[in-house]
Amino acid sequence: MPQSLTVHFADQALSDLRARLAAVRWPDQPEAAAGWRQGTDLHYLQSLVDYWRDGYDWRVRERALNQLHHFSAALGGIDLHFIHEPGVGPAPMPLLLLHGWPSSVLEFTRILPMLTDPARFGGDARDAFTVVAPSLPGYGLSYRPGQPRLDLAQSADVMAALMHQVLGYRRFAVHGGDWGAHVGTRLAHAHSELLAGLHLTMLILPRPAEPAADQERDYVTELTRWNRDDAGYAIIQGTRPQTLAYGLSDSPVALAAWLIEKFREWSDCGGDLERRFDKDALLDTITWYWLTGCISSSFGLYYSRRQGVTALPEGARVTVPTGHARFPAGSIHAPRSLAERSYDIRHWSVMQAGGHFPAWEEPEALVKDLRNFFRPLRTAS
């Protein structure tokens, strides 16, 4: 049985954080590295840390989080944290929301009321969802020191058990991006009988051995460039995660530098991070990682993937009806012809704005796409 929980961190943990922020030892930044050219910009990070230490108030976010219904369930050898919000409508559809890295379940808090109570936002009550938003195993409150590191397949099995065995949903909808897309894809492959539909903002595709069209060749070219120029973080998180974990677990400034560089790089911000995320939104997520101490465990899926645990076995195809919302920034975009080899694509939306974090960047567009895709699938759930 799931247990209700309250989000609360001790005053001592917050005092320790402030003390560490006050004692930071800054590196220099050579001219060649100015303006984010070699990673997180020193001057921006200093301004963020100043605000984190003297202006930011975690308790504001904590109070807002506790307006939601939080639970924990023992599954897969861990205590899995999840938010469970009932829908307001004649027949709410169960919807599992799966986050990625360096995000967290906090990303979904803005869209939760839009999904559960569409009439309140000018929508149709018949589009209501009952939303389950877990912290992925090893993330946030789904982490405790010393617990097992669940791989991609085990994480998908835990999600199936949560929705079907613990919460009793016979069939349900799934949405995911980043690692949430990996877990969702694995869930659709291994537990297809439970899913009414799968909605993704990132597609999990094999590299085509023989690209069949110009768009597919362009995709392979871009993938090659990304692996050469931008995949360093994933390589170290997947090969030497323990070495990286010491610094990021000991220094909140190092943690902030590691995370915000990805928020800037992968969002549709045009190089201006705060065009999409104000300092409070950034610090909510960074502080969540810090207070839960989960950064090392959050690398677990990267490591398991390097060990060969993938979303889809070679040659497999997802038969669950799949929708894809393509936001222009932060991802390598595969053509539909390639996607259809791995998924039963029923819905394909090309968005005008937004990036890797659409629930923050373009919440209304994401919610509209979720409603549109799942509307014809409700009768089958």
Image: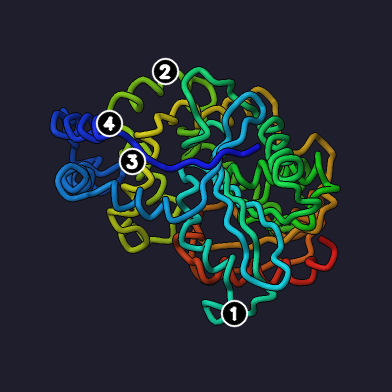
Name which residue type carries label 4. Ala
Which residue occupies 57% across, 70% down? 117
Considering depth in this image, is 195 or 69 the residue closer to the camera? 69
- Circle 1: is it few (<14), some (14-19), or many (20+) Cα within 10 Å? some
Residue drawn 38% across and 61% down?
269
Q: Do residues under tags 4 and 2 come within 8 Å of each other at their CB atoms?
A: no
Q: Element under label 1?
A: loop
Residue receiving disc 4: 13
Give whichever of discs 4 and 1 has the lower sequence position: 4
Label at residue 123: 1
Residue 306 lies, in percent from the top left, at 62, 26
Mark 4 to mark 1: distance in Å? 42 Å
Q: Between residues 369 and 257, which one lies in front from this camera angle?
A: 369
Q: Earlier in the sequence, mark 2 or mark 3?
A: 2
> What is the secondary structure assignment of the residue under circle 3?
helix
In this view, the mark in front (2 or 3): 3
Q: Is residue 358 visible?
A: yes
Please indicate whether residue 91 sits to the left or right of residue 59 in the image.
right
Determine whether label 4 and label 1 are within 8 Å by CB.
Answer: no
Q: Quadrant of residue 137?
A: top right
Whole-Å distance between the Cαs marked 3 and 4?
11 Å
User: CA–CA distance between discs 3 and 1?
Assistant: 34 Å
The residue that disc 3 covers is 287
Residue 249 lies, in percent from the top left, at 35, 25
Q: Earlier in the sequence, mark 4 or mark 2?
A: 4
- On-image quarter of the C terminus: bottom right
> Residue at label 2?
243
